[in-house]
Each structure stands twice: as C-alpha cells, then as structure tokens.
Image: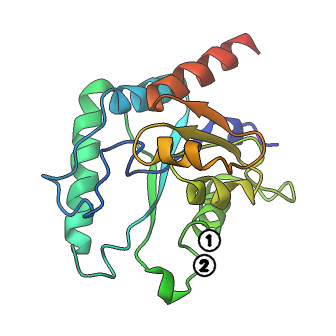
Amino acid sequence: MSSSASKLVILDRDGVINFDSDQYVKSADEWIPLPGSLEAIAELNQAGYQVTVATNQSGLARGLFTINDLHAMHQKMMDLLAPMGGRVDSIFFCPHVDEDQCNCRKPLPGLMRDIASRYRKADSVLPLTGVPIVGDSLRDLEAATVLGASPHLVRTGKGQKTVDAGVLPAGTVIHADLMAFTKSLLGSASNS
C-alpha cells in the first residue's frame, strides 16, 4: 500500500457534508453545511489527509439544476472551508440517472475507480484498500468496498434509515456524524 493512500479520505456529499433534500439540493443557497462537517474536513486536512468527494448528482440529468449551479454549490463549500484552513482536494460526480446505465452512478464503482486512478498507484488488486469512505447510504459504501475501501456510515442524512435497514457491508463502522468519524480516525491514527 502506498503511503499517500493512507492519507486519503473519500466523502459522499449530500447527507454527509451538507443537509440532504428529497427535492434535491439545487442551488448554492440550498447548499447548507451540516453542523461540524466543515470543521471535520479542516481537521482532516490539518492532520495531513487529502479529502475527495464522490457524489451522485442526478439532478443534472433531471434538469433540476445546471452544471454552473453545481459548481456554485461546490465553490460555496470551498469558500466556507478556506477560513478554517480546510479544503476538498477534488470532487468526482455522476450526472446520470439510473436509467442511463452508466458505470459512475453509485453503487457502481466508476467514480471510485476514477478516484483510485488519480490517487493510487496500481500496486494492489484492490486499489483503495484501507482508504476510508464515508457515506450515509448503502450505495455509497458498496461503491467503494468493491475496491477495498474501509466503509464508514454516518447517521446524518439518510444514515439512520440505512442503519435501520440493517444490511451493511462487512466491517462498516457507524458514526454519529462526520466530526465523530474524524475524531475516531484521528484518534486511531495517533494511536498506531
């Protein structure tokens, strides 16, 4: 395993970093961070982790918002992170709906393969071995565990519903929210 890999964290967006909506988050005004999520990303950065986001954004294909709206949401996230000393290194998104039968819409692993090829050397059969993936739904975790990532579920967003459904990948660790995940990761990293 390459040393840079152990310093990568993959986050879902809606329900993990920001409030989710069944009507979709369609604008920068509607993009509202969950309490403590941006501080958690900043803490990860300050501990030497690169943070990347992998997010399904089918609202694009549905015509609910434009690519410029999506960029504005992400710019707002970056602008709010900057004063905290935080940043998201990259954002990978799927603009499709299930009917498009693409390979990048989670739970399929296309986004994760793209992340793996950007951040990892192909030095193992499973290129994301040990990399934490944090999501609030089963599809987030399934997409990454196929490539060896370590699954972490937060109870925010759809997380509690996902916990209640009771079907999680083996080894899934459950956290209250992104800050609880961050504290756990940084605590275990300093103890190893």
Q: Position of residue 88 (x, y in %)?
A: 41, 44
Amino acid of disc 2: Asn
Residue at left 57%, top 40%? 153
Task: Please tell me whether mark 2 sits on a helix, a strand or a loop.
Answer: loop
The N terminus: image quadrant: top right
* Rendering quarter of residue 111: bottom right
Which residue is label 2 attached to?
A: 103
Tag 1 near tag 2, CB within 8 Å: yes
Q: Which residue is the extreme one toward the left?
A: 29
Q: Tell me the CA gap for discs 1 and 2.
A: 5 Å
Callout 1: few (<14), some (14-19), or many (20+) C-alpha neighbours within 10 Å? some
Q: Residue at x 42, y 38 (%)?
A: 156
Q: Earlier in the sequence, mark 1 or mark 2?
A: 2
61 versus 162 height, above or below: below
Query: Which residue is more in the foreground, 176 or 49?
Result: 176
Q: Tell me the quarter of the picture where residue 81 sits.
A: top left
Question: Which mark identifies residue 110?
Answer: 1
